[in-house]
Image (cartoon, helix red, strand yellow):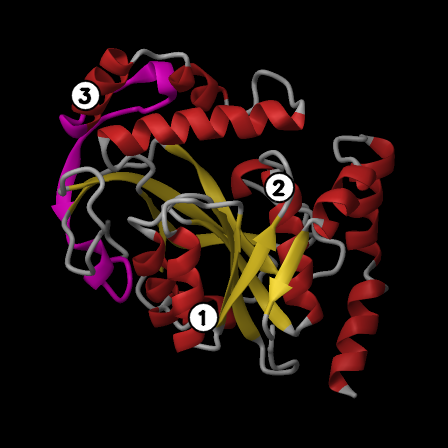
Amino acid sequence: MSRIRTVLSDVLDVRQLREWVSAYLVRRDRSLTRQLRVSRALTVRGRVGGAPGRAEIWAVGTVRDEADVVAVVVRHLLRQGVDRVVVSDHGSVDGTREILDALAREDPRIVVVDDRATGHFQMEKITALAHLAWRHGASWVVPFDADEIWFAEGTRLADFLRSSPDAVVSARVLNAVPHVDGGARLREDATFAVETASSFAPKVAFRAHPLVLVGPGNHGVNRAGAHSHGLVVVHVPYRGEAQVARKFRQGAQAIAATGDSSDVAWHWRAGAAMSSAQIAAAWQRIVAGDAVPDVGWAGGTFRPDQVLLRECWPKDR
């Protein structure tokens, strides 16, 4: 009965309905046809599970060819108290899918989704996974990428969200580079060079809702209600010369398939236009902490940190 009351309350939420109508019918910055098409291209493998009424925290993400990092990121989310991790795989060929399948066999809290959509369509995919989480009883949704390590300040991520009275919590993003040879699979005790000050747009976690719409890059959400902050994401997008080249090439191809304007994921397009020598030089500048403005890398001051061994992020950092 409590779940029925929750569903009715969400569906009849006038503020959220207004946000949804505005996105699709007033501003027309979203396409309902595109959302439905992308949603139909996602197929859950196995049992989703979930426990309505338990105020569960769900993490949802999409991945493609992230074999070097996906396992440690998923396990880290579970150590942060997340109740379920839902990951859609977009045609990985580097072993990522096999890693996810093995993780799901070991731990029923991990759910793998097949992604058959041609093109990036990131915000539509995350929106569809967020709706899936809501249908199965999620209270909060943490949208993540495979190169993101999520924390809360002073406590575990799930504990922070359960105690928050707000609808949206923003996360400041600290870029990082691993101290490993590119291509090696990251270990839990890996050391990273982490930014001392954020140079990237914040990410968001939000209360689950059937009409929620996640924005590009998980940097925003249309969730009605109070907003606050207190989360931290350590972002590790570049992890080796070969990985950088593949990321740019695949990202540019996926964006081209969507037909989106040239300002969407512009850094992938710019990187894909680089020669092998230019990418090698860019990687060396990234490792040195220098800015690479051509691909949106700010550089700055970094310090070493064994990020994955942390339980929470210090409040004074």
Q: Secondary structure at mark 2?
A: helix
Q: Which residue is mark 2?
A: 123
Please name the residue shown 75% across and 35% down the image: 30
Q: Secondary structure at mark 1?
A: helix
Q: Is residue 223 left or right of residue 19?
A: left
Query: What is the C-alpha distance between the residues marked 1 and 3?
Result: 37 Å
N-terminal-most mark, 1 or 3: 1
Foreground pick, 59 / 173: 59
Which amino acid type corresponds to the residue marked 3 in the rendered image?
Answer: Arg
Q: Position of residue 307 (x, y in %)?
A: 22, 54
Residue 308 magenta: yes
N-terminal-most mark, 2 or 1: 1
Query: What is the C-alpha distance between the residues marked 2 and 3?
Result: 30 Å
Q: Is residue 286 left or right of residue 254?
A: left
Query: What is the C-alpha distance between the residues marked 2 and 1?
Result: 24 Å
Q: Which residue is mark 3?
A: 285
Q: Which residue is mark 1?
A: 104
Foreground pick, 64 / 316: 64
Number of labelled discs?
3
